[in-house]
Amino acid sequence: MSSVEKVTIPSLIKMKKKGKKIAMITAYDYPTALLVDRAGVDIVLVGDSLGMVVLGYESTIPVTLEDIIHHTKAVSRAVKRALVVADMPFLTFNVSIEETIRNAGRLIKEGGAEAVKLEGGEEVKHVVKALVDAGIPVMGHIGLTPQRIAMYGGYHVRGKSVTVAKKLIRDAKALDEAGVFSIVLELMTAEVAKIITEEVSVPTIGIGAGPYCDGQVLVFHDMLGLFERFTPRFVKKYANLSEIILNAVQEYVKEVKAGEFPSEEHSFYMKKQKYEKLLEALGKKQEEEEK
Ligand code: KIV
């Protein structure tokens, strides 16, 4: 059996120090997680983007803790090398510290995640600290945080004004002080992401935050062309799987309707003698011979 060098929180911190880039991607099921782990990603996130790209909701708001636990179980059964991080859905944290710790604990104990991610800056500093004190590693997430999309009024790039830029830098520093092991920077100007990356001790993982972050994350379905409702400008499409799947399924439908599938190659037959015996037993031998 070949041995894999497991990605750990200390190894991610070391990567930042050595200037080695971190590759993170989302996954929500067993076969996808097997593939992305085999492809060499460092972190697999069971993101609440699940709600939009897998469950068909309009936003991430309806996603429940049970949804994330269910999908994290599948992902953690597959992943051998990468660090598995599970997202904390809207209002499963920050209602009370006790409830936050209990919910995060379920993602680790039942889901099999190695860490949790939660959205927010200065305002969740006390929550992050409580989780870290309870022994639960936390990844922060600032910038355009989709759980607060209604407050921003849309998916606009953050950090274009000096006021917002300063607030984002304060958020990142607060999370660093609270003990996060990494911070996702979503949809913000590259300059602000660069300053944050230089000023915090932990790796920054960008998504629509330019090239200066310590690592990058993309949503699996976006980068493979599996989510067609919209594609943000920061997403690079590495493949168009929708087209491949559509063509394949259309071909299947055509062959079934034309009686071309299954062919001999995909069918199983009895030994001739046994078949004849069966026909005889059923009184059908005569009929068959007359055909
Ligand atoms: O839910 C998610 O997939 C995320 C990533 C976009 C970072 O939070």
Image (cartoon, rainbow, N blue to C red):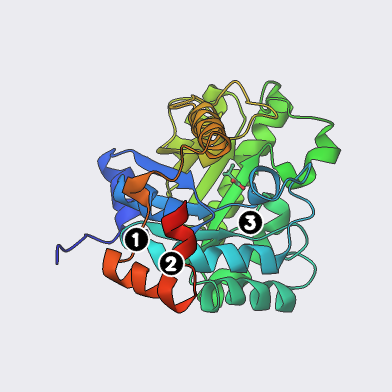
In percent of width and height, residue 113 lies at: 49, 67
Disc 3 residue type (three-letter): Leu
- Observer-nearest of 131 and 106: 106
The crowding category of the residue bearing disc 3, from other C-alpha atoms within 10 Å (few below 14, some 14 to 19, many at least 20), is: many
Of label 3 and label 1, which has the lower sequence position?
3
Specify the amino acid type for callout 1. Answer: Tyr
Label located before the other in sequence (1 or 2): 1
Q: Nearer the viewer, residue 290 or 143?
A: 290
Residue found 36% across the figure and 68% down from its top:
275
Do tag 3 and tag 1 residues touch (Cβ < 8 Å)?
Answer: no
Residue at position x 58%, y 71% in the image:
107
236 left or right of 161 in image: left
Q: Which residue is mark 1?
A: 269
Quick one: SS at disc 1?
loop
Q: Quadrant of residue 154?
A: top right
Q: Nearer the viewer, residue 230 or 107?
A: 230
Whole-percent x and y of residue 8?
A: 34, 61
**Among numbered discs 3 and 2, the one appearing first in the sequence:** 3
Report whether 237 appears left or right of 228. Answer: left
Q: Which residue is mark 2?
A: 285
Image quadrant holding the N terminus, namely: bottom left
Q: Determine whether label 1 and label 2 are within 8 Å by CB.
A: no
Report if the CB atoms under discs 3 and 2 are less than 8 Å apart. Answer: no
Question: CA gap, disc 3 to disc 2?
Answer: 70 Å
Q: Look at mark 3 in the image and give the residue it sits on.
A: 118
Tell us which disc is closer to us: 1 or 2.
2
Give residue 46's position: percent from left, percent from top. 55, 55
Choose top left, top right, bottom left or bottom right for residue 80. bottom left
SS state under label 2:
helix
Residue 114 vertical placement versus 246 (above, below): below
